[in-house]
Amino acid sequence: MADAVKKRGEIDIAYKWHINDLMASDEIWKSQAQNLKDEMGSFSDYKNNFTDSAVSLLACLNERNRLSHILENLYVYANMKFHEDGSNPVYQGMADQAENILTRLSSTISFVEPALLSLDEKTLADFIKDVPELEIYSHYFNNLLRRKEHILSPELEETLANAQELAAAPDSIFTMLNDADMKFGVIKDETGQEVELTHGRYGAMIESPDRDVRKNAFETMYAAYIKLKNTLAATYSASVKADHFFAQARKYASVQESSLSRDNIPPEVYTNLIETVHEFLPYMHKYVNLRKKALKVDELHMYDVYTPIVSGVNTECPFHTAKETVLKALSVMGDDYTDAIKASYENGWIDVYENEGKHSGAYCWGAFGCHPFVLLNYADKISDMFTLAHELGHAMHSFYTWNTQPYMYGDHTIFLAEIASTVNEALLMEYLRKTTTDKTMSKYLVNYFLEQFKGTVFRQTMFAEFEMLAHKMSEEGEALTSESLNTLYR
């Protein structure tokens, strides 16, 4: 009988996150959700007079923050419970309700920014003088004024807010397909034992020194996607079209400009990255040719690009070893930092192992006022240890932000999001290279470092270029089919 992945209830509680730190129970969630729906109605009382005085402006903005914070807790809790097991209908329903409440609240508060932009900078400055508590919003005001030409009338802002739930549909559909409905079948591992292929197990098998195992894992995994290629292409196309709709509605020249505008990033930063990586592609090609030579293969396939080219290395790394090693590696950041890392280990911040229906991959998430949470699908490999270090970087970024910034500035931008995580990975690599005495392991780590650079710089930039070109195709009226997307990607 094939080795099946565990169900959620079979995972030891010691390896599950303490989601109840965020929300004590489903019943409390339902109660708070209903209360928020009830409280939304009264927010419209601010609609016609909140810009009349500094006092009423402060009251309106503070109330908007309060409602938004409640929603954030509801939204994160429902979706993280859903991510524990996407096949659970209770949390499917709660996540859907959270999306609906998000749309309703966005619509309810949509009049605020157009009304703020009806005020000139002098009036806002005078309001801050009259009520110093408004000073905290000065950065928000400046950022809003910068985007003035892209903020629409109250009626159109309400319409766009109401459309958000429709725009979120492609992501929801893909999540249900990828995490809950898709099954990849059974393959044999290096020992000949039959195992159920899952997202979590795929990562380990694609690194296997046995080429037949990784080839079978790759072909079996992607056979399931190929069967759905037209559905997946249509889902992605719908997502791109939604981006295009909102960019057009807000009078941006492109989706790229729209996406970068909120963080005040010039499009040239994006295109310069792509151009620079193109310039240095020969170095990656040189490395890939070295990999081909080291593996002694006539043709390098996708199932050959992740397996170590240094043989004879034990890449097993149980979770307790990973925790200890990561903590030592990050000790250079100081006691305060490592105390927070210890808290993440001891106080249920991390959901460690894969279970049936669990969200694939890894991420860090959470809500202001609580600690961050980390989702892993840990498979006892060295690469999983680096994933732990990476996600803890995100966690520390959020932890320190939430403890030093007010709510309205408690979310870091995507432009900064990967800095702490990649620094953590670099520190872990430095520690391992300095403390390893085994020559073969040293070679393995050098190769792994090259792989990190290829994956973090070259591959991520390739994704960025693909997204840019796919959106341009859509903007120019070209169809995004499985064939055209495959051609573009290759």
Image: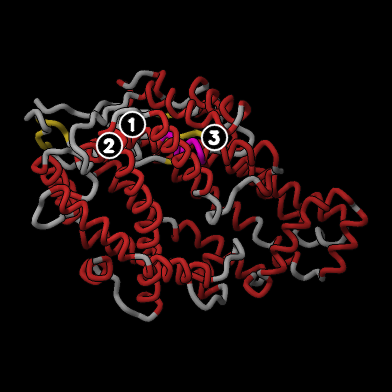
Q: Please identify the residue farthest to the bottom as the structure is shown.
A: 476
Start-end of magenta stretch: 388-393
> Does the rendering let one see residue 57?
yes
- The kind of secondary structure element at disc 1 is loop
Is 317 in front, or is 223? 317
Asked if the residue under mark 1 is in contact with the one under mark 2, i.e. CB atoms within 8 Å, the reply is yes
Indicate yes or no whether the magenta region holds residue 287. Answer: no
The residue shown at (77%, 70%) is 118
Percent of width and height locating residue 446:
33, 42
Q: Residue at x 52, y 71 (%)?
A: 267
For the residues marked 2 and 3, what is the alpha-carbon distance in whole angstroms?
A: 22 Å
Q: Is residue 135 left or right of residue 368?
A: right
The amino acid beneath tag 2 is Gly
State yes or no: discs 2 and 3 in contact (Cβ < 8 Å).
Answer: no
Viewed as shown, does residue 335 lie left or right of 475?
right
Tell me, what colour scheme is on the image? secondary structure
Residue shown at the point (29%, 64%) measured from the top left: 234
- Secondary structure under badge 2? helix
Say whether disc 2 or disc 3 marks the residue closer to the N-terminus. 2
Q: Which residue is mark 3?
A: 372
Q: Residue at point 25% right, 40% down?
A: 203
Which label sits on residue 200?
A: 2
In which image quadrant can residue 46 be found? bottom right
Q: Earlier in the sequence, mark 3 or mark 1?
A: 3
Badge 1 amino acid = Tyr
Q: Who is closer to the viewer here, 170 or 292? A: 292
Gap between marks 3 and 1 measured at Cα:
18 Å
Main secondary structure type of the part rendered in magenta: helix
Residue identifier under label 1: 378
Q: Quadrant of the N terminus?
A: top left
Question: Badges 3 and 1: C-beta atoms under 8 Å apart?
Answer: no
